[in-house]
Image: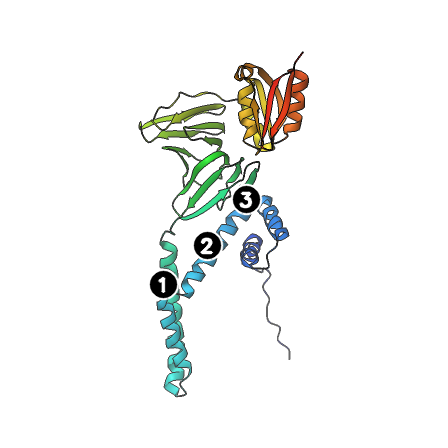
């Protein structure tokens, strides 16, 4: 007589995103990880928001396991269980499962306590060279665009997300996370937001904040003043604590530079040259400072000095002269 055991009509399945996330953690941690692997990983992250959530959870679990592996309590419990397996008496064979259970209990207790303890913030530094632009995704899914010669430091923990702009121009497209506020430090000011897109420009003397989407609160640490920006607004503050009131932001220009273009509408020539010079080691100069008053309109590709010089020669009757390897001087055409 043959007895057939009943089979379950439903089989629990794991979330495919979780399994894929764990595989990505191992793959990215491998010394054999290639640039193609990382490109494929970026595409996987972009495919769905839950992929980002699953990856962050898997990465945290991986870090927890790494820390638990060196925990002295776990090592002691493991040694006790190992010694129990080496004894041949009936008593030791009886005690061995208890020892193993004790070690697992210790592992569970330590693991739970570790997960409950807020992880310390880690500093991640990102930068670009002169003429370089870089797009990157932070650990929380926030998309960042670094303009030329820019430096930021990201400090994330279980409780907060903070980025410091050391210099340059940066665009933040912030991933929403109500449990962990996102803030940006620049100079003596602080920009606080939840799920927005904004830009920060930090020079030696001032900080400019421009808002494309959402809402941000800008605080100046010196003057203890707060100002709220709406989409299409910008403001500036300096090291002395003075903060300008919100004013209109040139959205066309703000949206163009992350795509590699500079948009100018009735702007002074000297301002245009300052902007273009940020992207090249060869600097454009004016032979006569009075030429800086010339107003210029147009769209110029970042770093394409040849196209800019051709436009200035044809449209504004200027002539360029190579004075040195790192300098081109502009003056009016003679005759």
Which comes before the other along the chain, label 1 or label 3? 3
**Residues at marks 1 and 3, CA–CA distance in whole angstroms:** 32 Å
Which comes before the other along the chain, label 1 or label 2? 2
Provide the residue designation for mark 3.
49
Left/right of residue 131 with respect to residue 99 in the rendered view: right
Instruction: Please tell me whether mark 3 sits on a helix, a strand or a loop.
Output: helix
Q: Nearer the viewer, residue 2 or 86?
A: 86
Rendered location of residue 28, percent (x, y)? 56, 55
Most distant residue in the bottom direction = 89
Label 3 crowd bin: few (<14), some (14–19), many (20+), radius 10 Å: few
Q: Which mark is residue 60?
A: 2
**Residues at marks 2 and 3, CA–CA distance in whole angstroms:** 17 Å
Q: Compared to 300, does 92 lie above or below?
A: below
Q: In front of the other: label 2 or label 3?
A: 2
Q: Which mark is residue 43?
A: none
Q: Compared to 247, does 141 lie above or below?
A: below
Q: Nearer the viewer, residue 279 or 23?
A: 279
Provide the residue designation for mark 1.
109
């Amino acid at each position: 007589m043959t007895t057939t055991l009943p089979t379950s009509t439903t089989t629990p399945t794991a979330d495919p995103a979780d399994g894929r996330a764990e595989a990505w953690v191992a793959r990215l941690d491998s010394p054999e990880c290639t640039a193609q692997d990382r490109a494929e990983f970026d595409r996987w992250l972009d495919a769905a928001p839950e992929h980002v959530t699953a990856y962050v959870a898997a990465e945290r679990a991986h870090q927890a396991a790494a820390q638990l592996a060196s925990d002295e309590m776990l090592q002691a419990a493991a040694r006790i269980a190992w010694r129990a397996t080496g004894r041949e008496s009936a008593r030791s064979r009886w005690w061995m499962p208890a020892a193993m259970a004790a070690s697992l209990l210790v592992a569970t207790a330590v693991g739970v306590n570790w997960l409950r303890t807020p992880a310390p913030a880690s500093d991640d530094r990102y930068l670009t060279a002169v003429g370089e632009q870089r797009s990157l995704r932070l650990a929380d899914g926030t998309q960042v665009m670094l303009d030329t010669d820019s430096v930021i430091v990201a400090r994330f923990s279980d409780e907060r997300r903070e980025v410091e702009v050391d210099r340059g121009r940066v665009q933040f497209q912030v991933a929403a996370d109500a449990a962990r506020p996102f803030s940006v430090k620049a100079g003596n000011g602080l920009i606080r937001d939840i799920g927005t897109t904004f830009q920060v420009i930090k020079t030696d003397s001032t900080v400019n904040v421009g808002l494309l989407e959402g809402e941000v609160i800008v605080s100046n640490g010196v003057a203890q003043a707060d100002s709220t920006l709406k989409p299409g607004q910008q403001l500036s503050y300096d090291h002395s604590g003075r903060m300008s009131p919100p004013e209109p932001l040139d959205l066309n220009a703000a949206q163009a530079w992350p795509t590699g273009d500079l948009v100018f509408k009735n702007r002074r020539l000297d301002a245009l040259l300052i902007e273009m010079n940020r992207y090249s080691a060869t600097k454009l100069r004016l032979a006569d400072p009075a030429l800086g008053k010339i107003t210029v309109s147009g769209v110029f590709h970042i770093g394409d000095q040849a196209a800019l010089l051709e436009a200035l020669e044809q449209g504004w009757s200027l002539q360029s002269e190579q004075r040195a390897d790192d300098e081109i001087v502009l003056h009016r055409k003679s005759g």
